[in-house]
Amino acid sequence: MSPPDDDTLRDASAERFLRLVQAKRRGTLKVYLGLAAGVGKTYRMLQEAQDLHQHGVHVLLGYVETHHRAETVAQLGPVPLLPRKHIFYKGRALEEMDMEGIEQQRPQVVIVDELAHSNVPGSRHEKRWQDVEYLVQQGISVITAVNVQHLESLHDQVLKITGTDVTERVPDRLLQLADEVVNVDLTVGELRRRLEEGKIYDPGKVPTALANFFQAENLLQLRRLAVREVAQLLGRQVETGAGGAPAVLAARCNDDRLLACINSNDRAAKEIIRKTSRLADRFSAAAWYVLYVQTGPETADRIGLATQRHLLRNLQLATELGAQILRVKDDDIVGAITRVAAEKNATLLVCGITSDKGLWGQISRRGVTNDLLRAVARSNQDLDIYLVTY
């Protein structure tokens, strides 16, 4: 028997998504995840929109960014395209997705491109992923797309791989809420070929892109991250028997509880929070916490406003990634950490340590981390420590 052709596979994909749409009161969420621009995420979304439209589904193109790529523009087809909303900001008229227009039309499915986009000030939400989250809550199903480098918990890894500080980011929980995540994969050679042929960026930008972000080694590592991300999401659904239900609704697999310990050091706190988020996801932890022990020298009237803002942003980041925030006032940092770990039945402490003078040199010196290692070793707690270097 001959293998199914592309049209048959697309038809089956559309029917499967349609069943999900009909089975739920909340909207369904489907995310196309790619390793970089140009792999074909928008192209695939528009193909699926056409398939659903042909099945009689009320589909609306809420926001599509073709980047003037001929292949993508050709896929716009018969599906209705919602005009963009104009918002005036600093004397300029800027275009954004028309949330009110989507709500008025109430489509069964809406296509929303550029998930990591930051909305123009004055929009209903600060981020487009918040728009998507809202639409799903309102019972409107969404198909959207994002590149792996925009996932919040991967920020530090992406920075090390590419040297690019990705400023527009999406909390991982949005992928965990998704009913379906599809990896839009392309070999590194094919992606670079598409770039060289002018199918991704204007010809004038190609040499710079090839020499920087689109280096073969960078793309290989980003591809690995994307494949791993989708595999972990799928594995969690299989292990919990989610069967298409949002992974967040599935019961956790074990009783691991992770406790991340941060201070007002901005860079260290971010890395610890993101690493703990990844560990909690990998372990399918029952819960994870972020603990900030405020000592006397760190009271609000004794630290600068910039430090306070960094701390608040980091606590907000932890909340977006799914942590529970714990704040304790105590000059005995080690005592506070071990006490909270016992109260929360933590199984893994995640702490930071600078690598400036060598890991073992830092551990052997007297300090909070050293004292914490000794305290845990002396205790009867079933507790391990994971050190994050920064």
Image: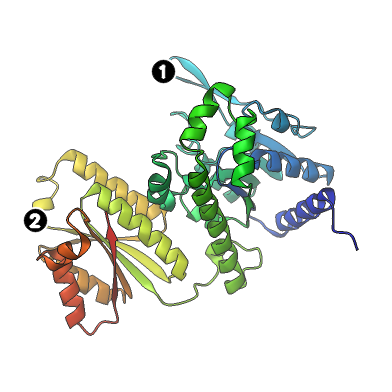
Q: Nearer the viewer, residue 121 or 256?
A: 256
Disc nearer the start of the sequence (2/1): 1
Horizontal placement of 262 versus 106: left or right? left
Tag 2 and tag 1, C-beta contact below 8 Å: no
Q: Mark 2 and mark 1: span between their CA atoms?
A: 43 Å
Question: Which dot marks residue 296?
Answer: 2
What residue appears at the point 58 percent right and 73 percent down from the top-left corner? Answer: 239
**Toward the viewer: 63 or 282?**
282
From this viewpoint, which residue is outermost toward the right? 1
Question: For residue 86, what is the image quadrant?
Answer: top right
The percent position of residue 203, horizontal first and vertical second, equals 58, 23
**Label 1 residue SS:** loop
Residue 144 screen position, x and y as percent:
61, 44
What's the residue type where badge 2 is placed?
Answer: Gly
Q: In this image, 348 relative to 54: left or right?
A: left
Provide the residue designation for mark 1.
Answer: 90
**Quadrant of the rendering where the N terminus is positioned:** bottom right
Which percent across, then down, holds residue 109? Answer: 70, 44
Q: Which mark is residue 370?
A: none
Corner quadrant of residue 286: bottom left
Q: Residue at x 41, y 55 (%)?
A: 321
Of the pair 228 and 21, the residue shown nearer to us: 228
Residue 237 vs 145, above or below: the answer is below
Q: Helix, strand or loop at disc 2?
A: helix
Kindly identify the residue that appears in the image at 24 percent across and 71 percent down.
340
Residue at (46% x, 50% y) in the render:
171
In the depicted view, which residue is nearer to us: 109 or 338?
Answer: 338
Label 1 Cα crowd, 10 Å radius (few <14 / some 14-19 / many 20+): few
Q: Amino acid at mark 1?
A: Lys
